Each structure stands twice: as structure tokens, then as C-alpha cells.
Amino acid sequence: MPALVLLGAQWGDEGKGKATDLLGGSVDYVVRYQGGNNAGHTVVVGDQKYALHLLPSGILSPGCTPVIGNGVVVDPSVLFSELSGLNERGVDTSKLLISGNAHIITPYNVTVDKVTERFLGKRKIGTTGRGIGPTYADKINRVGIRVQDLYDESILTQKVEAALDVKNQMLTKLYNRRAIATGQVVEELLAYADKLAPYVADTVLLLNQALDDDKVVLFEGGQGTLLDIDHGTYPFVTSSNPTAGGACTGAGVGPTKISRVIGILKAYTTRVGAGPFPTELFDEDGEALRRIGGERGVTTGRDRRCGWFDAVIARYATRVNGLTDFFLTKLDVLTGWEQIPVCVAYEIDGKRVEELPYSQTDFHHAKPVYETLPGWNEDITKAKSFSDLPKNAQAYVKALEEMSGAPISAIGVGPGRDETIEINSFL
């Protein structure tokens, strides 16, 4: 049962697309298990760059079946826009499968997301405004619309009516917006039914059968560990569980079937949106990391906040995910620094703390405690093995590995598909 979970070990944007793409040629299925089009993966194939938001990265690997699991929320308009864009570039998307139990992002979910965030003003969370949170809220409140509902107009109408009963009260009386008509929403959603039909499947059954047949299944998380609704820096988090446990609920496989959990770590740290960030830089170093690393959100287009590597966060990710391996990305971005600080602990109220504080207040006041490692100036983008790296780059990787609590089994030394050093095979 070779089932692997691949997830972000920081605040997202770690380069999961590159890691998934590296494995894509060796796996039979790649499964997105949570989130929606608020995620963003960039994959570089040759001289071609692909920005994926909702689709699994495995869709770029010809022999792989990409799957959108039941834990994902799907905006049909975004889905078909993304599929169309790939088809125009010659990518075969016909193998895509979508769980009939996945929830649909409706037009009113997007409306609620935008007006709520605007209403919060300076207290806003920093959502992408794509309706992700309200859709998950509808799911928990049992008024959500699932993909399978598009094939029973009566059920669909009843569910939309139920959802709009409360939302229209809120939109008209609190936000001074127009009420949304049930019929209009139903009509819009039904227009996608025939287009979605070829992709809809019982993905839970299919994936479990695949694992029983010794197929290789890769479960791909969006966002990152510190954005997990339960285990992240709440309330500045996403609305789902990007951590390893989310793969079980979001795809319908039992935990005993997971054989390996791979955490993606950037060689420094970035974050998009509001919330605490102990190692954030506001100086020339921060700007240099942003510029050299191309740190702009794939989905949001927002500049990412940048800071030095945070080993406290890496250790936390190892613990809550049960990580067996790390994939370290963007090591090449650090080329040129004479000295590279690494956060090894926090100072909170005058005390040294080496593990992530559970208290939101403590984390908000955490100040980084740095150790400085020597940098390197040599170009590492052509390195094919660990021994090809400069001695100081090797020492940096080994130090991060020791601090983080799991072996670093692969290193990204450039954006290209072939600019990766494999130390240990993930399969």
C-alpha cells in the first residue's frame, strides 16, 4: 500500500507543486484532499511554467490520474477555466476524477466571503475572497451543496433555499446588499451538470481499491501546516486541514494505509496574509528574499512576507504530521549571503522557548532567537548530488535537518523540473 502524503510544513507556498511533479511520473494517482482554488502550485516543465490552483499537480504527468477528493471545495467556473487553459497548451486533462461528495462553491459563498472580509476592516483575516470559508461553513452547518446534488434538481433547489434563508437576511439587513434569488443560483449550478458528469466518480472506493492493488497514491495538500484550521496560527488560518490527518478524511482512506508523510520546507520562511510571523524581515534582506525568490502568491498575486528559516515551526510540523521526510526547496535563493541567520528558539517574556507555544498570545509576542550559519557564493543550480553543493550549503542543509527532526530527502536548487537533488528516494 504505497500511499504518500505530501504537504506544506510552513505557511504554504513552500513549492509543493515542484515536489508533486517530481513524483508524478512514478505514481498512479495524485489526490488533492482539502482546500479549493485558494491554493496555488507553480510547476516548471522545461521552459513552460504552469500555475495550478484547484487541479492536482499530477495533471501534468501523462501516466497519472489526478483526483479531486471529497474534502476539496470546487468552484466549477474556476475548474473549467483551468482545464481549458491546460487543454489549450496541449495538456491531456481527460483522466481527471472528482468526488461526488466534494462541496461546490456557490455564487453566494463568494459574495458572503467578500462582504464579510470587507466588513471586518482592520480585523480582517486576509482571505482570498474566493468563497472557501463560507463553503466550508455551509458544509459544517449541513446546508452545503455537493457535486452529486447537481443531478437531482429537487434536492438542489431545497438545499439552495435552505442556505439562502439565513444568508439573504444577513446580506440585506446587515450588509445592505440585494437578496439572492434561489432560481438564479439553481439555474447557474445546473448549467455545469453535463460538463462535470464525465469527471464525477466514487473516488473513495476507487482510491481504496487502487491501494489494495498496490498502486502508488500521492495525497497532495494545499496551503501549509501553520494554516491548518485546528493546528495552525488560528484565527489566521485556512478553513480546512492541510495537515496529514486531513488526507484521511479528505480522501476517504484509513490512516493505516499511509506509508510516508513528506513535508515541504522552504530554505527560508514566507507567509501571505495577516497573522504572527516571528522571523519576518522588514529590511533589505527581506526585500532581497522576495525579489530573488519571486515571492508573489500564485493565487492571490500578493507579495509574500519573507523571513529567515524558523526551525521551531519545522519541528512543530514534524510532530503534528508525523513527518518521515522533508523536501527542502529554494536553497538556491540563499546564494550570495555571507551569513544566514536561522531561528532556533523564541524569547517570550524573557524566557527561551524551543517549541511552538500553544497560546495565541505567546506566539504573537515571540521574538526569534537566531544562530548564524556561514553562507556561500557559488552557483548551485547545476548541482546533481549533495556532494556537488558547496561545503557551507551542505552544512546549512544538515543543520536544518538536525533542527527540524526529520531527514531531508530532496533539495530544490532551482525552479526547473530537473533542478532537484534526490538524496533518498520517496518511493
Image (cartoon, rainbow, N blue to C red):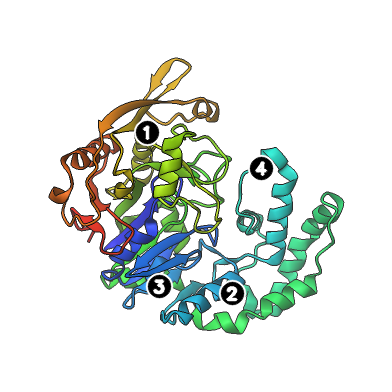
* 73 sits left or right of 349 in the view: right
The kind of secondary structure element at disc 1 is helix
User: Where, quadrant-wise, is the C terminus in this rendering?
Assistant: bottom left
Which residue is label 2 attached to?
Answer: 148
Alpha carbon distance from label 2 to label 1: 43 Å
Disc number at residue 124? 4
Q: Which of disc 1 and disc 2 is earlier in sequence?
A: 2
Q: Amino acid at mark 4?
A: Lys
**Is the residue under label 4 in contact with that under label 1 (CB below 8 Å)?**
no
Disc number at residue 12? none
Q: Which of disc 4 and disc 2 is earlier in sequence?
A: 4
Q: Amino acid at mark 2?
A: Gln
Residues 317 and 389: in front is 389
Residues 100 and 84: in front is 84
Which residue is label 1 attached to?
Answer: 312
* 68 sits left or right of 314 in the view: right
Disc number at residue 59? 3
Residue at the far top in the pictured view: 350
Q: Amino acid at mark 3?
A: Ile
Residue 423 lies, in percent from the top left, at 18, 53
The kind of secondary structure element at disc 3 is helix
